[in-house]
Image (cartoon, grey):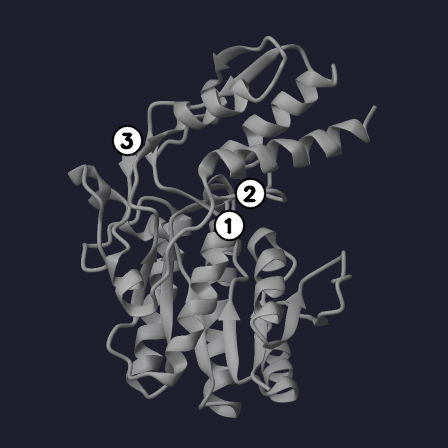
Amino acid sequence: MNHVLLTGANGFVGKVLRTKLCEAGYRVTGTVSSEPLLRDGVDHVRLDIRNAAEVEQVVQQIRPTHVVHLAAISHVPTSFRDPVLTWQTNVMGSLNLLEAVKSHVPEAFVLFASSSEVYGEAFKAGEPLDEGSVCQPMNPYAASKLAAELAFVQYFRQGLRGVIARPFNHIGPGQSPDFVTASFAKQIAEIEQGLQPPVLRVGNLEACRDFLDVRDVCDAYVKLLDLADRPADQRIFNIASGQARKIRELLDELLAQSPASIAVEQDPQRLRPSDIPFAVGDCRRLQASTGWQPAHALGETLGALLNDWREKAATVR
C-alpha cells in the first residue's frame, strides 16, 4: 500500500487532507507538533520539523512512498512579528525533510505545499498569474516559501521526484480566525449569540482574491500525487479558481446568511502593510495535467464556515 507521510496533519488543511488521502486508498502517518493528537484513527507521530535528528528518525522509521509537506508558519502577520521562527520552520524545516528523504527514501514522491503569496508584487499586473510569472514576495512568509521552493527544485535536479503546489486562498470550517473569511464568520456567530456588540470589524474589503473550498484544494493535492507514476513534465502547479472576487462579496454573502442586523466598520489594525489589490491565479496547467476542477460553490463553503462558528459560539454561552 502507498504510504503518505503528512507533515502538519493537525492543521486546517491537514485535517481535511488526511481524510481525502485515506479515502483515496493511501495509508497515512501524520506528524503533529503539539496537542491535540489525531483522533480519527490515522497513525501519527510528534515531530518538530526544525529538529533535523527528529525528522531523520521519523522518515527512517516510516519509510513513506509519498510525502506531503504542509507544516509551516502560514500566517503573514506572524511572519512579520517572528521572522526567525518563520524562516527556521519554513526553510530549515523543509531542508531537514529533503535531506531525510534523500538519505532514506530517495524513491519517494514529495509534494511541497507552497503558496500563491510567492508571486507578491507580480500581482500588480492586474491579471491572473500562471506558473511562469516572476516571483516577487512582499512579506517574510512568502519569501520563506519561495526559498523553500528553490531548495526543492535543487533536490529535484539531483533526482528526487516531486512537485510544488501554489494554492491560492482556501477557506472552510476549522480555519483560524486569523484569516479573513473565518474572522467574518466568527464575529457574525458571536454577534448572533450576543457575545459581542453588533459591529463587525474588517480590514480592506476592496481587494480581489481567488478563493477555493479547502476540500477542492485537498482534492488537487491528491490528484498531484498521481503524477508520481508519470514523467515529470512540470514541477510547479497553481491551485486556483481563476475567478476574482472582492472580499466585500464574501462578507455580503455571509451577512445575507445571518438574521442579525450588523454594522460594518473598518479596523486599521486589520489592514496589512503589504496588501495588494488583485491576486488571482491561472490554473490551466493543473487542469491539463490532472483533470482537476473545483467542485464546491463558494456560497456553500461560506455557509458551512458560518455554521461551524455558530456551533462554537453556542458552546460559549
Q: Earlier in the sequence, mark 3 or mark 2?
A: 2
Mark 1 to mark 2 CA distance (whole Å): 6 Å
Q: Callout 1, which amino acid?
A: Val
Dividing the picture into quadrants, the one containing residue 196 is: top right
Residue 129 vs 289, above or below: the answer is above
Q: Position of residue 172 (x, y in %)?
A: 55, 43
As measured in the structure, the alpha-carbon distance from the residue carrying label 1 to the one carrying label 3 is 23 Å
Q: Residue at x 61, y 88 (%)?
A: 60
Mark carried by residue 286: none
Q: In the displayed structure, does residue 28 sit left or right of residue 38?
A: left
Task: Kindly check if marks 1 and 2 are in contact, taking CB atoms under 8 A apart as contact.
Answer: yes
Q: Does residue 287 lie above or below 230 as drawn?
A: above
The residue under label 2 is 172
Residue nearest the observer in this picture, 62 or 246 = 246
Q: Which is more N-terminal, label 2 or label 1?
A: 2
Tell me if residue 238 comes above or below residue 190 in the rendering: below
On screen, residue 85 versus residue 120, left or right, reads right
> How far is the residue under mark 3 from the one under mark 2?
23 Å
Quadrant location of residue 236?
Answer: bottom left
Amino acid type of disc 3? Answer: Pro
**Residue 177 pos. (x, y %):** 59, 35
Instruction: Report the label total.
Output: 3
Q: From the viewer's perspective, is the residue at label 1 or at label 3 nearer?
A: 1
Say if mark 1 contacts mark 3, CB within 8 Å: no
Q: Residue at x 60, y 86 (%)?
A: 1
- Is residue 222 visible in this depiction of the protein? yes
Q: Position of residue 62 (x, y in %)?
A: 64, 85
Quarter of the figure with the C terminus: top right
Q: Which residue is mark 3?
A: 277
Instruction: Identify residue type, mark 2.
Output: Gly
- Residue occupied by mark 1: 214
